[in-house]
Image (spheres, rainbow, N blue to C red):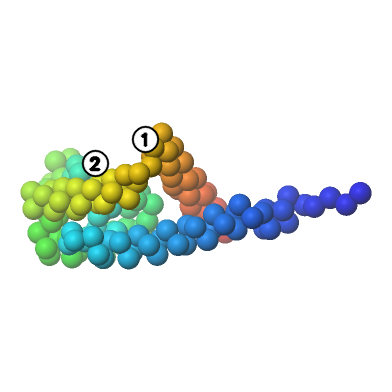
Amino acid sequence: MTTTSPQATDLTDPVHTQLQYQLALFARRMEQVRGSDGVAALVRAAYLLLERLERLGPANVKALADALGVDSSTVTRQVAPLVAAGLVGRVQDPADRRAVRLALTPLGAGRLAEVRAGRTELTRRLVADWPREEQQAFCALLARFNHSMEEYTAGRQGAGGA
């Protein structure tokens, strides 16, 4: 009797093959839609930084990097144009007067709200003909998938990027 190893099965599983293709297509379509939705877009990194600052409040670069799963130099590079545009400001750290934190400015909060509203409306339109239960299931499964990717990435970083 011949058995197939689990790894070989995973590599040829049509569900996984189709899932990776659908994810690649999803990423491409999101970029296409974002550029044509009528709302002046924020690049993904800017959107996520503004979103995180709204949730965390003023934060230092390291806290933002940890929250986003990137390194501090990436946050520093990505936040520079947001500071230049007045969407993010630097505020004194109350715990250490020598340190600064990054904070969402009123302009940044307004821009984030505008972009979020546009994205929410687009998402609403895209799933308008889906039953509510399917919309909720899709959201839950996508959140679960994102969590799995976050854990995978954290595990690889903890293992030295192996």
Residue 106 at least partly seen: yes
Element under label 2? helix
| Residue at the outermost front position | 129
What's the residue at 28%, 61% (across, down)?
34
Query: Which part of the image, by quadrant, shows the C terminus?
Result: bottom right
Classify residue 146 as left or right of residue 87.
right
Foreground tag (2 vs 1):
1
Can you give x and y, in whole percent of width and height, for residue 156 in the image? Answer: 52, 53
The image shows residue 130 at horizontal and vertical percentages of 38, 42
Q: Nearer the viewer, residue 133 or 85?
A: 133
- Looking at the image, residue 22 sits to the left or right of residue 67; the answer is right
Identified at 13% across, 48% down, the residue is 109
Q: Nearer the viewer, residue 60 or 146?
A: 146
The first of marks 2 and 1 along the sequence is 2
Q: Amino acid at mark 1?
A: Arg
Q: Residues within 10 Å of mark 1 (few under 14, many from 20)?
A: few
Q: Marks 2 and 1, how far apart in space?
A: 30 Å
Tag 1, which secondary structure?
A: helix
Residue 143, image quadrant? top left
Horizontal and vertical percent position of residue 39: 18, 59
Name of the residue lying farthest toward the right: 1
Residue plotted at (35% across, 44% down):
129
Q: Are marks 2 and 1 in contact (CB under 8 Å)?
A: no
Residue 3 circle label: none
Amino acid found under the numbered disc labelled 2: Leu
Q: Position of residue 86 (x, y in %)?
A: 9, 59
Which residue carries the number 2 mark?
56
Residue position for label 1: 132
Q: Residue at x 47, y 57 (%)?
A: 23
